[in-house]
């Protein structure tokens, strides 16, 4: 039975069931061209859902899901909740001066490696009020979702083309303030 296409469908499962949809995904968002890298496809695509991929690609989730469903021959359109589109205003704690550790994940991702293990190890070393800065070529929504489930807060911004900075700190650290916006 073919894979259903919903916001929670993993990208790798989608492409296993419907390999012809790879070009459709790339047409929807050029950032998805990285899916052609077989190593990234085996790592990031296995954990990333279509909901997360839409955020990374800056694409409407509803449009992406329904275009994929149509191209896969599924005539029933799905009503999709879009959710938050970004991290909102910079929280008080997300300042460069508080960065105590950092990782530029771009070389790792180019080699098809996933930085999650290194990020989690570094987060375990953070002291009160310290933040970790992750640099990536795209918004690493699956990684952000994982660190949030482990009790961290995250905020990100696009510093330039293929240059995203993610600030991460322990949830409940001092000065969380009401301006903190969580990623959804």
Image (cartoon, rainbow, N blue to C red):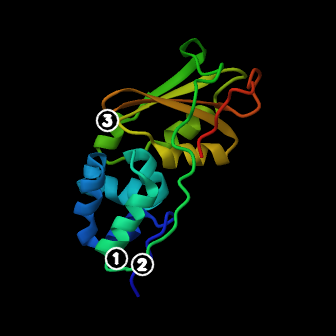
**How far from the left and from the top, in percent, is residue 150?**
67, 45
Q: CA distance from mark 3 to mark 1?
A: 30 Å
Secondary structure beneath disc 1? helix
* Crowd band around label 3 with a 10 angstrom C-alpha radius: few (<14), some (14–19), many (20+): few
Q: Nearer the viewer, mark 3 or mark 1?
A: 1
User: Label 3: which residue?
Assistant: 107
Secondary structure beneath disc 3? helix
Residue visible at 56% across and 35% down in the picture? 87
- Quarter of the image where one finds residue 97: top right
Residue situated in front as seen by the camera: 171 or 182? 182
Whether label 2 touches label 1, CB < 8 Å = yes
* Crowd band around label 1 with a 10 angstrom C-alpha radius: few (<14), some (14–19), many (20+): some
**How far from the left and from the top, in percent, is residue 54?**
42, 52
**How far from the left and from the top, in percent, is residue 151?**
70, 41
Q: Is residue 59 above or below residue 119?
A: below
Is residue 3 visible in the rendered structure shown here? yes
User: Label 1: which residue?
Assistant: 17
């Amino acid at each position: 039975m073919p894979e259903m296409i919903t916001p929670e469908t993993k990208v790798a499962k989608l492409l296993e069931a419907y390999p012809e949809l790879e070009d459709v995904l790339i047409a929807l968002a050029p950032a998805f061209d990285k899916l052609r890298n077989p190593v990234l496809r085996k790592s990031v695509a296995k954990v990333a859902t279509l909901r997360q991929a839409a955020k990374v690609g800056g694409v409407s989730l509803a449009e992406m899901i329904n275009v994929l469903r149509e191209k896969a021959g599924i005539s029933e359109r799905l009503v999709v909740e879009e959710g938050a589109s970004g991290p909102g205003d910079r929280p008080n704690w997300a300042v460069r001066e508080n960065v105590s550790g950092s990782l530029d994940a771009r070389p790792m991702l180019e080699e098809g490696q996933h930085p999650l293990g290194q990020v989690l190890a570094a987060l375990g070393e953070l002291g009160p009020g310290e933040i970790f800065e992750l640099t990536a070529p795209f918004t690493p929504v699956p990684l952000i979702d994982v660190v949030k489930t482990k009790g961290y807060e995250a905020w990100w911004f696009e510093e330039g083309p293929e240059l995203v900075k993610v600030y991460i700190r322990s949830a409940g650290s001092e000065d969380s303030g009401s301006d903190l916006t969580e990623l959804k």
